[in-house]
Image (cartoon, rainbow, N blue to C red):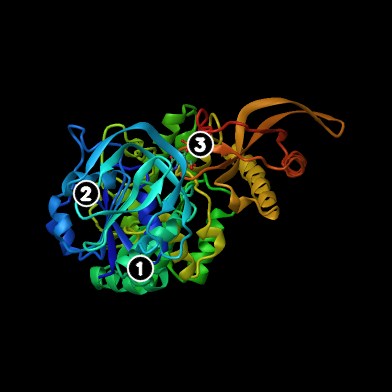
Amino acid sequence: MNEQIVILDFGSQYTQVIARRIRECSVYSTILRFDTPAAEIAKLAPKGIILSGGPSSVYAEDAPLPDKAIFKLGVPVLGICYGVQIFAHFLGGKVEKGLKREYGKGTLTVADPACALFEGLPEALQVWNSHGDKLTRLPKDFTVVGTTENSDYAAIENPHKRFFGIQFHPEVAHSPRGKEVLANFVHTVCGCGKGWTMRNYVEQAVEEIRAQVGSERVILGLSGGVDSSVAAALIHKAIGDQLTCIFVNNGLLRAREAEVVQEVFGRNFKVRLQYENATPLFLRKLKGVTDPEKKRKVIGKAFIDVFQAATKKAGQAKFLAQGTLYPDVIESVPIAGNPAAMIKSHHNVGGLPKNLKFKLVEPLRCLFKDEVRQLGLELGLPKEIVYRQPFPGPGLGVRVLGEVTKAKCELLRLADAIVVEEMKAADLYYKTWQTFAVLLPVRSVGVQGDERTYDFTVAIRAVESQDGMTADWVRVPYELLEKISSRITNEVRGINRVVLDLTSKPPGTIEWE
Ligand code: XMP
């Protein structure tokens, strides 16, 4: 079993960020619900426990509280923000409503440089606070190890028990040296090594896949996206020809997507690749459909039909592999007022129905996206796939506005390829969250050469984002926009106008649909 740190989630929007920061220290971390029984936690033999922040007050009627026995497990505990209140609540301290909500940047003055958390750090640290209630009496056997402008008990320690409480958030970027605080906790205090790396994980996962699958056959729906691609490469490494990948070309892919998948997986990796060209079927089903929701439904259903038929063709397989990631399996803590609880549940059409009679192989279940990319590189996948931008399941179906036809898809593919190519040449493509072209259902008059035209309009959409939930439009340099625009209008017959989308999300969405 990997050495690990258990993070108890009290509903902080930053819980997953804490988990990722710990993993960046090459230490495995697991997120559990705040009320997981101590006996269950003990089974994982964690080297340390972190209590996340949370939006509650320990005095609230329905305040989330942990099993008190976690303090008797004999492992170090680090309470962050609300986690400090938990110490106070259980171990004899006192919390009161702060007169002023401490929110934003602050300076932590280290009161005890001998405290292991602050090893190698300066005496004054820029930190990020976000809490209303604050500690007014120390829990039993705790001492003060740090103060801020607003709090005499900003960092506290019980050195004997190895319990630490910090009111600031070390996991966010606004606490520039916070990661070192976390690193000190996991390495110096908890004694964790640096065994969690994707190189090590490959070996571990290969063994686990072999043990799970035995001599049975596995099928995997390969979309060309990062997750399914990395899952395919990993499973193929473990079981070779026992894996069959099914790739459905729905006619709504971008330029060269189908070719790249065939090249990388078919020719390079020698994966058994079953290529299903279902373009005519999808386009037939989409004929005359203009409503965005209806288009999604049509595409989703056609995909399921094609995939199910393809699995039958692939022969007897007992297992279905999926590129499910850790954020999809973490049980979210639905605490009132917690925006993190609402994130998710967005569109994920294009998924498979639950009633497929397969057992699941999900070798990325415990990984975050950045780890999956790292794993992809470790397995030798090209940058084009590993750093691929998010691409919606319904593909160009949501980027050709109005009715989707073969001709419109082709126009959009040509224009989109120019956008991508020029952004790559300017070294901007992989720095943006998504950059693509949208074909608008608008025709307007133009003049090309001596000819009057009446052609379509393309919009350029380039956004920066952390997670797709909010986004800002990218300030693409004018010279580059000029180049893209003139190339599109010169090279793509049928498009005579290029516009730029200047809308952030909210109020806009990333895709136009
Ligand atoms: P919106 O357009 O809602 O998109 O701002 C947010 C993110 O989700 C992607 N997206 C999808 N992904 N299936 C997916 O797998 C879909 O149907 C879908 N629709 C939108 C979008 O590209 C952006 O990254």
- CA distance separating discs 3 and 1: 47 Å
Lower sequence index among marks 3 and 2 = 2
Q: Position of residue 163 (x, y in %)?
A: 25, 58
Lower sequence index among marks 3 and 1 = 1
In this view, the mark in front (3 or 2): 2
Circle 2 Cα neighbour tier, 10 Å, few/some/many (<14 / 14–19 / ≥20): many
- Residue sitting at x 43%, y 35%: 296
Q: Which residue is mark 1?
A: 187
Helix, strand or loop under label 2: loop
Determine whether 379 is above or below 78 in the image: below
Determine whether 386 is above or below 480 in the image: below
Mark 3 and ligand 1: say if the CB distance to the nearest ligand atom is below 8 Å: yes
Q: Residue 139, labelled with which disc?
A: 2
User: Toward which corner of the image does residue 110 lie, by quadrant?
Assistant: bottom left
Circle 1 Cα neighbour tier, 10 Å, few/some/many (<14 / 14–19 / ≥20): some
Helix, strand or loop under label 3: helix
In this view, the mark in front (3 or 1): 1
- Residue sitting at x 46%, y 64%: 374
Q: Residue 398, labelled with which disc?
A: 3
Q: Quadrant of the N terminus?
A: bottom left
Residues under numbered marks 3 and 1 in contact, where contact means CB atoms less than 8 Å apart: no
